[in-house]
Image: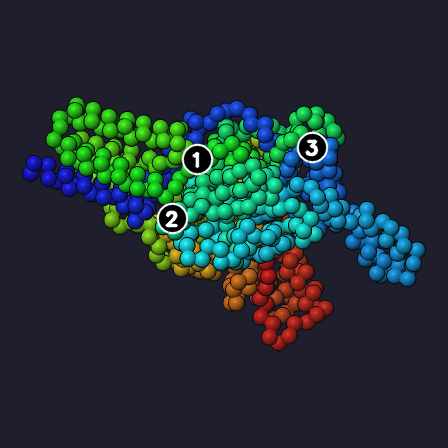
Amino acid sequence: MKKHFVRFVLGALCVLLMLAHAGRLLDLSPVTALDAYLYDVRVRLSMPGTVDEQVVIVDLDEKSLAEVGRWPWGRHVIAELVQRLTDDYKVKVIGFDVVFVEPDESSGLKVLEEIGRRQLKGEAGFHRVLQDLRPGLDYDQIFAQTLRGRPVVLGYYFSGQESAQQTGVLPVPAFPAGSFAGLHVPFVSWQGYGANLPVLQAAATSAGHFNPLVDFDGSSRRVPMLVEFQGAYYESLSLAVVRTLLGNTELKPGIPEGSQSIEWLDVISGQGRLRIPVDEHVAALVPYRGHERSFPYVSAVDVLKGRISKDQLADRVVLIGTTAPGLMDLRSTPVGAAFPGVEVHANLIAGMLSGGLREKPGYVLGIDVMQIIFFGCMLTVLLPLLPPFRATLLAIVSLGVILGLNLWLWNSALLVLPLAASVLLVFMLYALNMSWGYFVESRTKRQFTELFGQYVPPELVDEMANSPESYSMEGRNAELAVLFADIRGFTSISEGMDPKDLTHLMNEYLGAMTDVIRAHRGTLDKYIGDAIMAFWGAPVADPANSRHAVLTALEMQSRLKSLAEPFRAKGWPVLSIGIGINTGMMTVGDMGSPVRKAYTVMGDAVNLGSRLEGITKDYGVGVVVGETTRARVGDVTFRELDKVKVKGKDDAVTIYEPLGLTETLPAAILEELKLWQNALRLYRSQDWEQAELLLYNLMQRSPDCRLYQIYTERIIALRSNPPTQLWDGVTVFQTK
C-alpha cells in the first residue's frame, strides 16, 4: 500500500477537484466546456427529427423582402398580415419575434403635418383634407386598431449594457416588484430595453422578451422564462404566447417546501395545469426537435397574397420572424451554428405544450456529487492495486454505468444530469494510474494550449509551456499596444452581396489579417463583426510591442492590396480598412461573466485605440497611431496628422500616420514629409498665407492626398472666422 501512496493522494486530489467543480466551489472551464459539448451531443442524438405542425413560422424571408420591400415594412402592411392570419386563416395566436420601437413615418403624414404647420398654416381646405386623410396615413394607429381584440403577443428585448437606453414601453410584468422577497433566486437582470410603441403595447394582448441565455461558448441552450428589471419580473415571448393560447392564464412559481429557489412555473388555465421546469436562473432548456426547419415555414408575402391554403395555418400558433441574413436573427445553437432565432421560440412553445421540456432541478447537483464520490473513491483505491488489464476493464465498466444511468434519466425522466465531471474523473484516474509521471507535464501543456491557443501563435504557446509558472490568465496591469481594424463601408458591402459570397469574403479577409497578426507575435483578442482587435505584450512580454503593432498594421494594408486582384476575379468588392493603434497601461486578463469569459484588455488606452481607428477615414489615411506608440518606435517614419481630442478624453493627443521603415522609404516621400511638417508648423502659428502656399505645392505633388485638402479647407474657414487668442489648433471629435 505504501508504494501506492502518491497515487492515492493524487487520486484523492482529483476526486476533490471534481467535487469542488460539481459543488460549484470551483469553476473548471474545461469541465464546463465538456459538459456543454456532451449536452449538445445528447440533444442531437435524442431529437425526433420530425416536423411539428402545431407551430408555424411566418417568415420575413428574402422572397418577402424582394416582393414587398426592404425591412422595416409599413405598419399598415404588418396590420394586413395580422388581419389575414386571424380573420382569413383563423390562427389561434400570433407571436412577433420582432419589435416595433420607432414610429412608422413611411406614409408621409409627418411631412404633411409639418407643411400644415408652416407653408399651408392658414389653408383651411388643406387641413380639412389632411384630417380626412389622417386615419389612413397613421400606420401605427392602423396597426394598433388591428391588434385590438386579436390574440397577438408582441416581442421586445432587454439590454445588459450599463449605457443601455429604455425605449418604448414594457408590458405589465408577470410578477410585480417584491414578489420573490426572501428568496435567493439569481434572476437574469438587465439595464435597459427596446420595447414597442405605447400605442401598440396597449393594443396587444401581451408581450414577451426574446432574449436567450448565451452560454460561455456563444451557444443558446436556454431561454429565461422570467427576467428581472428594476425589481419587476417579465416573461419570455414563448411563455407569453402559451399563456395567451390557453386564455391569458394565471402563472404561479413552483417553490418546493423549504427551498429558496424556483424549480418550475405552473400555467393554470381552464384546461388544467401546465408545468414548465426551470433551472436556478428560472430558464427553460430549449427542446430542439431537429435542425433548422423542424417547423413549417411560410413566406410572409405568400400570406399577404393569399397563396397559402387555410389548412396550413388554421388553428395553429404562428410566430412572425425572419431568416433573412441581413436582418441578423441567427443564433448559434447545439443543432446549428446559424439557427433562426424565431425557431428557438417555436421549439420552446411546442415543448411547453407537449410537456417535452427537460428538467435540471437543484437536486441533480446532489446526484452528481454522490456519483463522483462513489466512483471516485472506488477507482482511487482499486486502480493502483489492479494490473493494467483489470484496471482498464474496471474503468470501462465504470464509464459504461455512468453513461447508461445518465442516458436513462435523460430519456425516461427528461432529467438533465451533469456528465462531464464524472466521465472526466474516470479518465483522469485511469490516466493517472497508467502514466501518472508523464501526465503532470503533458496536462500542463494541454492547459496552456486550451487557454491561450486561440489567442496567440503556437510558437508562443510552446514558449510559455516551457515555464508555465510564469504565466497566468489572472488580471494584471501592463503597458501594451492595442490594434483595431475595421472595414470601411461594410454595411453597404454586406447588403449588396450574396450571403454565401459574403461569408467566403470575410473568411478570406479575416484569415489573411489574422495570419499577419500572428506572424508579428500578436494576441488575437476578438472579431467584432467585420472588425479585428489584437494586442501585443501579453500573455508573453514583448518589449517591442509598439513596433510589432505598427509593422503589423503596415503589412495588413499591404496584404489587403494583394487581395484586391483575387477579389476582383471572384466578383467581390475591393476592401479598404482603417487601423488604429495605441500604447499605454491596460488591464489584461480573463474577463467576463460566469457563463462566458475571454482573455482581453481593458482601459482608457484601449478606448483611445478604438477612437483612433474611427477617425482614420476623417484624414483619409489607412493607419493612425497615438503619440506614445510613435515614441516607442524608432525605425519607422511617421507623418504627424493633427492634435485631437477624442470622445471620452479631456486631454489632446497628437496622432501620426506610419509611412514605413525609414531605411526603405524613397527620398521623394521624405522630401514631401519635410514640406508637410513646415506647412503644419505654419498652420499652427496662424501664418495662413505661407501654410496655404505650401499646401498648394503639396497637392500638386500628391493630388489624391485628402490630408492636404482638409487643412486647405480649414485655412479657408479660419480666414472667414478667425480663431481666438486661445486657439491651440486642436481638433475635437464628438463621435468615434
Q: Amino acid at mark 2?
A: Glu
The quarter in which the C terminus is drawn is bottom right
Q: Earlier in the sequence, mark 1 or mark 3?
A: 3
Residue at numbered disc 3: 90
- Figure quadrant of residue 574: top right
Element at badge 3?
loop
The residue carrying pointer 1 sits among few (fewer than 14), some (14 to 19) or many (20 or more) residues within 10 Å by Cα, namely many
Element at badge 2?
loop
- How far apart marks 1 and 2 lie (CA) works out to 22 Å
Q: Earlier in the sequence, mark 2 or mark 3?
A: 3
Q: Amino acid at mark 1?
A: Arg
Q: Which mark is residue 358?
A: 1
In this view, 206 is above or below 585: above
Element at badge 1?
loop
Q: Which mark is residue 257?
A: 2
Residue 439: in sight, yes or no? no
- Name the residue at 59% across, 30% down: 54
The residue carrying pointer 2 sits among few (fewer than 14), some (14 to 19) or many (20 or more) residues within 10 Å by Cα, namely few
| Nearest-to-viewer mark from 2 and 3 | 2
Q: Amino acid at mark 3?
A: Lys
- Name the residue at 75% across, 49% down: 141
In this view, 506 is above or below 123: above
Q: Earlier in the sequence, mark 1 or mark 2?
A: 2
Q: Is residue 199 left or right of residue 617?
A: right
Residue 705 appears at what percent x and percent y? Answer: 62, 52
Q: Are marks 1 and 3 in contact (CB under 8 Å)?
A: no
Q: Nearer the viewer, residue 350 or 421?
A: 350
